[in-house]
Amino acid sequence: MAVKNFAFKVLKSDNFARCGLIETHRGKIHTPTFMPVGTQATVKACTIDDIKKTGSEIILSNTYHLMIRPGVDRIKNAGGLHQFMNCDLPILTDSGGFQVMSLAKLNKIDRKRGAIFNSHVDGKKFYLSPEESIRIQLGLNSDIVMIMDECPKKSNNYEMIKKSMELSLHWAERSKKAFGKNPQKALFGIIQGGLFKDLRLNSLKGLLEIDFDGYALGGLAVGESQSEMFEVLDNIKEFLPYQRPHYLMGVGTPSDILGAVKRGIDMFDCVLPTRSGRTGMAFTWDGRINLKNKRYQNDNSPLDPKCDNLNLNKYSKNYLNHLFNTNEILASMLLTLHNINFYQELMREIRKNINSGTFEEFCEKYIDKL
């Protein structure tokens, strides 16, 4: 039986919102899709089997963290990331650029050598060039590979953002060359340019000339407001290639996702559902709930009556409040799984409403509630 190459097609549109299908040799991914974040080869507090039971069809893992611990050679010797973490789902790996900006103790950007930085763990010096980032991701054997880019902090300094965008385009060319021919994998370009429309469009134009399997928007979720993020998407949505997946990196809240789908985005990842699950915050169809709050101490109702998966409603708010306030590990496990499940329920409802032509009404109903 022939092994499938990476492919994407749009199945249904509702204005700019669209349902699509990504095909990989590891399985199909229905879009719009949310990717749970498995930063260090694990989705925190969850097993892969439970992640699959939520309906998740792809996860994300992180090049920066894995190159530091345990190292790409150790994972490669184990047979690749899928075997290492016992995951048969497709995996997308990011390039590490965002973590270099946000986590590294010291970092320096060099056009030729890439990012030079000290590990946030032990201070060890690393060099991460576009070629090295691709080499690491291919060594991990991920299914969707991201180009090396520079991810600047939010700034109104036009010349600084322009210089960064042009550097990312230079690195994009080098990333594409280093990736070579890997038809079973995909290489995504990353559109940079901050909040400036002309820079975003120039970045996209340059990436289209290089030609990638998908196009991501980077440099967002770095402190801008939701309205600023939506403006960036409004400025670029009609120029994104129709028959390529569109990925908004590191976003976000359910409200962010609804607004971004409305503007043509197909793929999302964010640590919010897992991080919130470890700190007592639950996402429900009636809004967010802080289960550490005293008001839930005698509330024996289920967490979300509308949740119909994994039998999670057998645990009351009262019991979950008790688990969090006694620092029991089970609290993080249950609420993390609940939140990931909620995000996947949201994606299924989004796809359902796009297919039925009712997404606009669905979006308006929930965008300010979730």
Image (cartoon, rainbow, N blue to C red):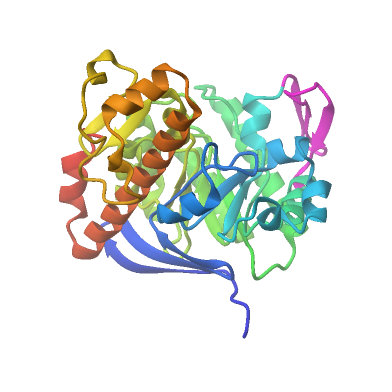
- Which residue is at a point 69% across and 53% down the rendered structure image? 81
Looking at the image, residue 223 sits to the left or right of residue 103; the answer is: left
Give the quarter of the figure containing the C terminus: top left
Q: Which percent across, then down, holds residue 127? A: 82, 35
**Residue nearest the observer in this picture, 65 or 148:** 65
- On the question of residue 90 being in view, the answer is yes
Measured as percent of width and height from the top left, residue 108 is found at: 76, 25
Provide residue 132's location: percent of width, then percent of height.
79, 46
Query: Which residue is found at the position 57% from the left and 59% from the top?
Result: 90
In the displayed structure, 246 sits above or below 4; it is above
- Residue 91: quadrant of the picture: bottom right
**Quick check: is 194 in the magenta stretch?**
no
Q: Quadrant of residue 103?
A: top right
What residue appears at the point 38 percent right and 39 percent down from the top-left corner?
339
Considering the image in quadrants, where does the N terminus appear? bottom right
Say if residue 195 shows up in the picture.
Answer: no
The residues colored magenta run: 105-130
Q: Is residue 342 left or right of residue 94?
A: left
The residue sitting at the bottom extreme is 1
Left or right: 358, with 6 as reference point: left
Q: In which quadrant of the rendered view does residue 145 lie?
A: bottom right
Image coordinates for residue 244, horizontal then vertical, percent: 48, 62
Q: Toward the viewer: 43 or 301?
A: 301
Up-down: is 156 above or below 24?
Answer: above
> Which residue appears at 30% of the width and 44% of the height?
258
